[in-house]
C-alpha cells in the first residue's frame, strides 16, 4: 500500500487526473437511458487535468467551508466516544489500478477507516432519524477499503449546531467484496475512456 502524505509536494501531483473514491459514485451513476451526465462531466475534468497538469477548479460554498472547518472537531468527538485513535491516512494509491486512489479521513486500528461528513443540519437530522447512509458514501467507503485493504469503515455524520446528544452519528460499514469487484470493473473501463479521450485530443490537436 502506497500512501502519500497530504503535507507532501507529491500529494497534489498524485491526484491529478486520478479517479478518487469521493467521485466513484459519479463513475457508476446511471439513468434509464445510460450513464448519467455526472460521469461525462467528471471524465472531462480528469481529461483536462491530464492535459494541463493542473487541478480543475472546484466550487466551494459556506456549507462546504463549515464542513472543512468542523472536521477536526468531529474527529476528536469520534475518538472520545469510540475510544479509538485516528491516524492520518493521506492519499492511498490503489494497489493494482493506476490513476486511482482514495483519501479516507483516517486509519482506525489495524482493520478500519474513518469517513467524516459535517453536512447541513437538515441532512444530519434525516440521518439521525433513518439511520441510513447515502449510497454515494457507501460507494466512496468501499473504494477506500479497496485502496487501503481494510475490513470496515466507520461513517460519521457530525453537526455541532444541535444538542450534544444529537451531534454525532456513527455507523460501521463492512467491506463488501462483491460491490468492490463491480466498482473495479467500472473504474477500469472509465479510466480507459479517459486515456482514449486524451489520446484522441492530442492526435487531433497536437502541440505546436
Image (spheres, helix red, strand yellow):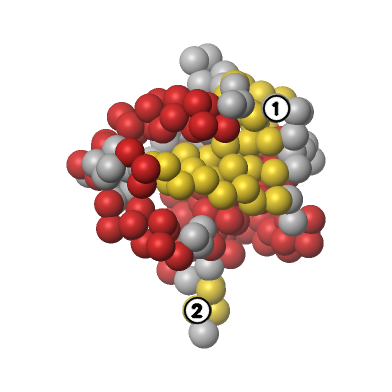
Label 1 secondary element: loop
The label shown at residue 195 is none
Residue 77 image point, x, y percent: 44, 30
Q: Residue at x 50, y 79 (%)?
A: 31
Q: Is residue 65 above or below residue 109?
A: below
Q: Is residue 160 left or right of residue 135?
A: left
Q: Is residue 9 above or below residue 18?
A: above
Q: Is residue 149 above or below residue 197?
A: above
Tell me the quarter of the image containing the C terminus: top left
In three-dimensional space, the C-alpha distance between marks 2 and 1, rounded to whole angstroms, equals: 39 Å
- Give 206 or 32, whichever is nearer the viewer: 32
Q: Residue at x 75, y 28 (%)?
A: 110
Determine the image quadrant of residue 167: top left
Most extreme residue toward the front, as rendered? 165
Q: Residue at x 62, y 48 (%)?
A: 172
Q: Is residue 151 left or right of residue 103?
A: right
Residue 181 image point, x, y percent: 77, 58
Residue 114 image point, x, y percent: 57, 37
Q: Is residue 184 above or below residue 206?
A: below
Residue 193 image point, x, y percent: 62, 58
Which residue position is annotated with label 2? 31
User: How dense is the environment of label 2, judged by Cα within 10 Å: few (below 14), some, or many (20 and up)?
Assistant: few
N-terminal-most mark, 2 or 1: 2
Circles 2 and 1: CB atoms closer than 8 Å: no
- Give 196 or 8, whichever is nearer the viewer: 8
Is residue 195 visible to the viewer in this orientation of the structure?
no
Is residue 182 visible to the viewer in this orientation of the structure?
yes
Which residue position is annotated with label 1? 109
Most extreme residue toward the left, as rendered? 62
User: How dense is the environment of label 1, judged by Cα within 10 Å: few (below 14), some, or many (20 and up)?
Assistant: few
Amino acid at each position: 500500500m502506497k500512501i502519500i502524505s497530504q503535507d507532501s509536494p507529491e500529494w497534489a501531483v498524485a491526484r491529478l487526473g486520478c479517479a478518487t473514491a469521493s467521485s466513484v459514485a459519479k463513475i457508476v451513476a446511471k439513468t434509464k437511458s445510460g450513464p448519467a451526465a455526472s460521469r461525462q462531466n467528471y471524465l472531462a475534468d480528469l481529461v483536462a487535468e491530464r492535459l494541463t497538469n493542473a487541478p480543475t477548479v472546484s466550487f466551494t460554498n459556506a456549507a462546504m467551508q463549515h464542513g472543512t472547518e468542523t472536521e477536526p472537531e468531529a474527529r476528536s468527538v469520534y475518538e472520545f466516544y469510540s475510544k479509538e485513535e485516528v491516524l492520518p491516512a493521506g492519499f492511498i494509491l490503489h494497489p493494482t489500478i493506476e490513476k486511482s486512489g482514495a483519501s479516507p479521513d483516517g486509519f482506525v486500528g489495524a482493520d478500519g477507516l474513518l469517513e467524516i461528513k459535517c453536512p447541513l443540519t437538515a441532512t444530519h437530522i434525516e440521518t439521525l432519524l433513518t439511520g441510513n447512509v447515502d449510497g454515494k458514501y457507501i460507494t466512496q467507503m468501499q473504494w477506500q477499503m479497496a485502496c487501503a485493504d481494510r475490513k470496515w469503515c466507520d461513517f460519521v455524520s457530525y453537526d455541532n449546531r444541535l444538542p450534544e446528544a444529537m451531534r454525532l452519528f456513527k455507523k460501521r460499514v463492512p467491506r463488501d467484496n462483491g460491490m468492490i469487484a463491480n466498482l473495479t470493473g467500472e473504474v477500469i473501463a472509465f479510466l480507459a475512456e479517459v486515456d482514449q479521450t486524451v489520446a484522441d485530443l492530442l492526435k487531433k490537436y497536437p502541440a505546436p
